[in-house]
Amino acid sequence: MSQYVLRRLMIAIPSLLGISVVLFVVLALAPGDPFSELATNPNVPPEVQAALRAKFGLDDPIHLRYLHWLNAMLHGDWGFSFVSRMNVDTLILQRLPATLYVIGSAQILALLIAIPVGVYAATKPYSLFDQIANTLAFVGFSLPTFFTGILFILIFSVTLDWLPFVYTTDIKGTGIHWVLEMIRQAIMPVAVLGLFQAASMTRFVRSAMLDVIRLDYVTTARAKGLGQAKVIVKHVMRNAMIPVVTLIALQMPAVFGGAIVTEQIFRIPGIGSLLISSILSNDTPVVMAVTFVFACLVVLFNLIADVLYGWLDPRISLR
Amino acid sequence: MLDKELRSMIGEVKDGRMDRRAFITRMAAVGLTAPLANQILALGGVAMAEGASTYKPTKRGGGGALKLLWWQGPTLLNPHFATGTKDQDGARLFYEPLACWDPDGNMKLVLAAEIPSIQNGGLAADGKSVTWKLKPGVKWHDGTPFTADDVVFNWEYAKDPATSALTIATLRDITVEKVDNLTVRILFNKPTPFWADAFVGAPNTIIPKHLFKDYMGSKSREAPTNLSPVGTGPYKFVEFKPGDLVRGVLNPDYHMPNRPYFDSVEMKGGGDAVSAARAVIQTGEYDFGWNIQVEDDVLLRLEKGGKGKTVYAVGGDTEFIALNFTDPNTEVDGERSSIKTKHPLFSDPAVRKALSLLIDRESVKKAIYGRAGRTTANFLNGPEKFVSKNTTWEFSIEKASKILDEAGWKPGADGIREKDGKKLKLLYQTAINGPRQKTQAIVKQACQKAGIDVELKSVVASVFFSSDVGNPDTYSKFYADMEMFQIPLSQPDPSQHMRRYLSTLVATKENKWQGTNFPRWVNKEYDATIQAADGEMDPVKRAALYIKANDLMYQDTVFIPVQHRLKVEAAANNLRPVVSGWANETDNLFDWYREE
């Protein structure tokens, strides 16, 4: 087992290196530069702009810049933001709590809806409940988050005036008041994201369950006289969860990566909004760090999913 | 007005025979506004009037929280590193300049004790130095006294190229010296009619020597105070999250009486302009929204029964279409739009003239800018004293067609005019931005009717305004026939703005396209006019020179002004913000209050 994990980690190194080369080259080739805002400021002469480019090494050849970056990354230095003039890791760590809270809650909400609904729908396929669940799921993943987000704002903030639509990180107040406010302002973004995720996940859980529920061993279990609940939870679900775990594991990096559109609509200061504003201002060190961390997380969670398979189904051996 | 008459009037004010108000009224009668009159008096030897304050509260604090919404939040808080106005706005909450600009373009004192004038000995008559007296008793937020050393330090800090401060441009050509603890003198190497640049306004705020002195030059990025400012301003720093949030609380030792009104201030970043307008005007979640560049229809709809309104400030920002005087399609020595070429179509003045008749500025205002725009014939639209009254504009497809007909541009089989085998086909580029694309469509339609085929192109703003030498789509490379954008006039003076178009500053491959004269327009008379204005200390003659410069551009149709744009902000109904078109939004924040 530990040997397996070690081997997988070793394999990850060349693939991460490859990913970093691709990311770096793409970003270096991308047009624009971080000092574009200065160009139309008549107070800043062009020489100053040129000096800044030189200072931040933007005029060096691309392979040198890559080696610099790699060397720094190996020493734990994530880079230095051109735009904020501070270390990229501080910038990312500042954004992490909001992302984890909002996106994490949305994922939990999605699971809390998808698993019971999917399982129940699968036990009674083509029943009225199943039909309704299916219809809502289709509606759910057909509506993009930027649409539902704005719709929610118009209904719950503008018309009903129940919920705020600007997410604030420094809520005044302490104790229970603070907790309530935190929940209140997260309701809309969490609902928008969670319902969207839940829609596709429900369909997935349902079909995974249906695949298993028809198998002979389930009939055997029923024939032994086991109750419906026990059959479904202990015998069907455990096997049906293997593909679901893969799906969830691959979505976990997204929890850290944030949700660009939703974060922008609700002004959540998460990793997604950091990424998009850095892309727009050509702050390459930040873009590079965020995307690279994201790549690392994808590799890591793939590994975790593989290890979990062994636990869910002892027949899968890890060698 | 006759120069002599003006002079005698200035003399009367000086001697006390005419009061200041009467002088300003007389000036207004001939079309000159108060800020101009004041500047004329200042340079004529009468002290400049201090901007009037509309501040009403009679005690410090008690105003609760002020919630500001900047849809692009500040990403750093050291004013010397500010890349855009958003960063200056954030830093200005804590740091202060010597003086700032009020909505009329008058100077308001902040850290200075008096406005320098020839009378009080602050201004040298030859325009080569200015002496500022500092307000006594001002303390940094950590209790250290503010002195002349701090001012001198800011100059030393920024002029060192290793610091890579963006304020270097303002500070490198001057010398700042300490006269005594509360007096500094700024020396210029040539007569400088506009002396109020260094240390004035939000872009030029002052940072404390005692916290930055160990972080000059290449160590500048390591200063911990870069991220947690200690200033002299009305609010003390609490918290900063780049791009997201800046927070401050009332400074109980603030040097202005009864100020500030608010107990705390919060500047939230992120999102977009429309939803920012909604959060201020419609739901009232925030008190003030910055730079609400939203279509007027949308704003009018939000304002109906809303909790807020829009606020406008007049400055000198002009949205223009620039014409390329060189050929963007011919390569000379590996360079397109080379100064060695002539534009095949625009070298005929009739074509340029016809184009200026085809820009329907009134429709652009009605359909796009609404209350946030004014039609204009001038490239230079402010301050008022520099605005030419000699120009006019009109929209007439018939007249344009007639001019083209007379110049020999006849419609071909496809309806597009041609002459000597050259077809009137133009490439018109701009940055991606809703109003700009709509303007493009309006212009294209009118041109089509006059037999000019216009191809539209839009480039992402971060590319269009970039200085990236490798990118062909930047505004300075200008690989198109015409392009549209605006260059903000960031101070109430046109000198820097107009200098850009000197013929020595043409953007070329040789200077890596960093020359500021992107239309590649060469006019000896213009050069001479600008150079004369640069050293002219007489304010009336100087204004006349800039008006002449503007008129030369108008005659040659270098720029076709599309709209004189106003600043648009959103504010809660009970908030009394003071916003100047000549300054950053937070420059007058100390005078903001809420009507109970």
Image: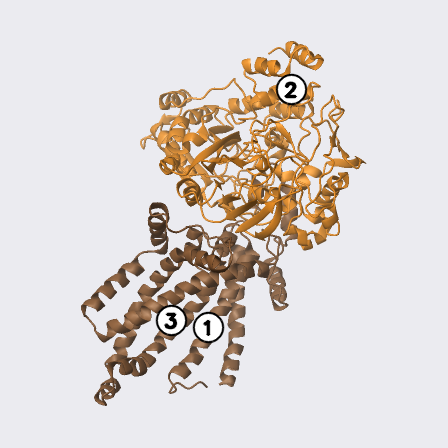
Chain colours: A brown, B orange
Please state if B376 lies on the left or on the right of B103 as rendered. Answer: left
Q: Residue at x 48, y 72 (%)?
A: A299
Q: Residue at x 31, y 70 (%)?
A: A204
Looking at the rendered structure, the secondary structure element under dot 3 is: helix
The extreme right residue here reads B180
Disc sitting over residue B40 in the figure: 2
Question: Is A38 placed above or below A312 here?
Answer: above
Given residues B556 and B219, the one toward you in this image is B219
Looking at the rendered structure, the secondary structure element under dot 2 is: helix
Say which quarter of the image contains residue B98.
top right
> Which residue is tagged 1?
A301
Question: Is B404 placed above or below B146 here?
Answer: above
Image location (x, y in percent) of residue A68:
63, 62
Image location (x, y in percent) of residue B118:
73, 22
Inspect this view and state whether residue B453 appears.
no
Q: Are marks 1 and 3 on the same chain?
A: yes
Image location (x, y in percent) of residue A119:
28, 73
The amino acid beneath tag 2 is: Ile
Please state if A201 lies on the left or on the right of B568 as rendered. Answer: left
Q: Chain of mark 1?
A: A
The quadrant of the image that shows the N terminus of chain B is top right
Neighbour tally class for label 3: few under 14, some 14-19, many 20 plus, Cα within 10 Å: some
Disc sitting over residue A247 in the figure: 3
Say which quarter of the image contains residue B203.
top right
Question: Is B448 placed above or below B434 here?
Answer: above
Total of numbered circles in the picture? Answer: 3
Mark found first going from the N terminus, 1 or 3: 3
The amino acid beneath tag 3 is: Leu
Measure the C-alpha gap from mark 1 to mark 3.
10 Å
Q: Chain of mark 2?
A: B
Looking at the rendered structure, the secondary structure element under dot 1 is: helix
